[in-house]
Every structure is written in C-alpha cells, then in structure tokens.
Amino acid sequence: MRITVFGSHGRTGLLLVQLLLAAGHQVVATIRNPGHMADLVKLGAETRMVDLDKSAFEDVVEACKGSDAVIFAAGSAAGEGSALDRKGTLRTVRATEKAGVRRYISVSSIGASTGMSTRTMDDEMKDYYKQKRAAAKHIAGSTLDWTLIEPAELTDEPGTGKVTASLVAIKETAIARADVAAVIGAVLTEPKSIGKAIQLAGGGIAINAALNKALG
C-alpha cells in the first residue's frame, strides 16, 4: 500500500513510518521542518513539505493523491494551541476526500469519543479535549472509511505487543508509542475497524487478539 503519514517525524509518527516501511508499504512522509527530511529519506520514505497550518490546501491534497490510506498522527508542538490539532484534522480530512482516498486513520486521545468528563481538568486540558472532540465529530461526519485510535498516556518505553482495546471507556493505563504504532498497522486493512473509535491502553492481550475482541 501507498500511505501518507501526517506528523511523520513526531515520536509516534516516526515509529509508525518505520513499521510501515518494514511491512513493505510505500510511505509518503509529510514534514514541516526541512531539518527532518534526511532522517526520513534515510529510512526510505518519500517526503513532502506540508505545514498543516500554513501550506496551501492544494499542497495538502497533493500529499494525499495516489495513496491508498492517509494517517493523521500530527499534533501541536510545544507552545502551540490545541486548535492546531483540530485545524490539521479538518484540512487532512477534506484533502483526503478531494484526493479520492477512502481510508483515513487518526490518532486522538483516550476518552475523546466516550464522553469522558473533563470537569476536574485544568483549562489547557479542557481545551485540548474540546478540540479533539470537534475533530472526531468532523471525521465521523466525513465520507471516509475512518478509524479513530484514542490512546491513553503515551510513553517512550519499548513496545510490549500487548494492549487493552475497547469501543467503550476503559481504565487509563499508559501505553508505549510503539504499541500504538503497531495497532495502527494492524487496523490499516481491517474492515471491522471502519467507523469505529478504538480506546487503547496498556494491557496484557496480544494486539491482534485485543482488536478481535474489541471489534467482534
């Protein structure tokens, strides 16, 4: 498959690019910092300069054209507001539709689709979830074959290959970014995941078994 990855040099995105390439996929890795290009070219990815906040919409569309799937793993950087996450989602969903690509996977945050209470959160986190929920609503209202991955707190620990996955609210147990990347790779061609928001946390069930249990 040819797969466009937005946020390809983030800590989760880079692991995802490596996983997809190792699986034999062709990856179009979008970046907004030219200093990151060498890392991705060395891995074997095709790179495109795309800033989801500032680039022309047609540049976003071009990055999606010819791909079999688009994965949104981007996020706002330190000092940037959470509204950028929502804007990036809206632009990539529209671009994916315009490019004629059907499959779209987005990495969000645990509870964004389950109505998790934000009452005790600080203002920054409340805004973060407000933007994530608006983005999820936009994805769900699109014409795409979408899947939302909503992981708990992310760590940089080595992946375990085991998770907890569910379509309803689950306990927030931290999960390795490598395991999130592996789950994305697993749902990429899984038709049962289309139209689903998967809650994801650390756990003791092998990834494929956990997904089969969650998706039925």
Image (cartoon, rainbow, N blue to C red):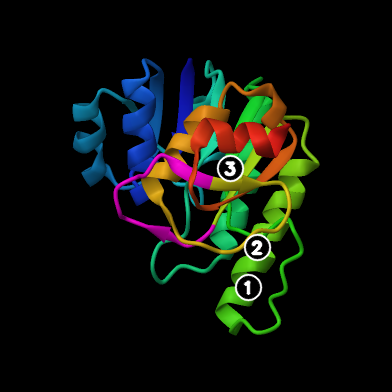
Q: From the image, tell me which residue sits under label 1.
A: 127
Left-right relation of 207 to 14: right
- Crowding at dot 3, Cα within 10 Å, few <14 / some 14-19 / many 20+, comes out as many
Per the image, label 2 sits on a secondary structure element best described as helix
What's the residue type where badge 2 is placed?
A: Gln
Percent x, y of residue 152: 53, 59
Relative to 66, residue 171 above or below:
below
Q: Position of residue 212 (x, y in %)?
A: 64, 31
Hey, which quadrant is residue 147 in on the image?
Answer: top right
Q: Which residue is mark 3?
A: 106
Q: Which mark is residue 208?
A: none
Q: Which residues are magenta?
A: 152-163
Residue matched to label 2: 131
User: Chief secondary structure of the magenta span?
Assistant: loop
Q: Does residue 30 show up?
A: yes
Going from the N terminus, do you reach mark 1 or mark 3 first? 3
- Residue at point 68% right, 53% down? 135
Task: Find out whether residue 153 is within the magenta segment.
Answer: yes
Q: Which picture quadrant has residue 83?
A: bottom right
Q: Nearer the viewer, mark 2 or mark 3?
A: 3
Circle 1 residues within 10 Å: few <14, some 14–19, many ≥20: some
- Asked if residue 101 is positioned above or below residue 146 in the image, the reply reads above
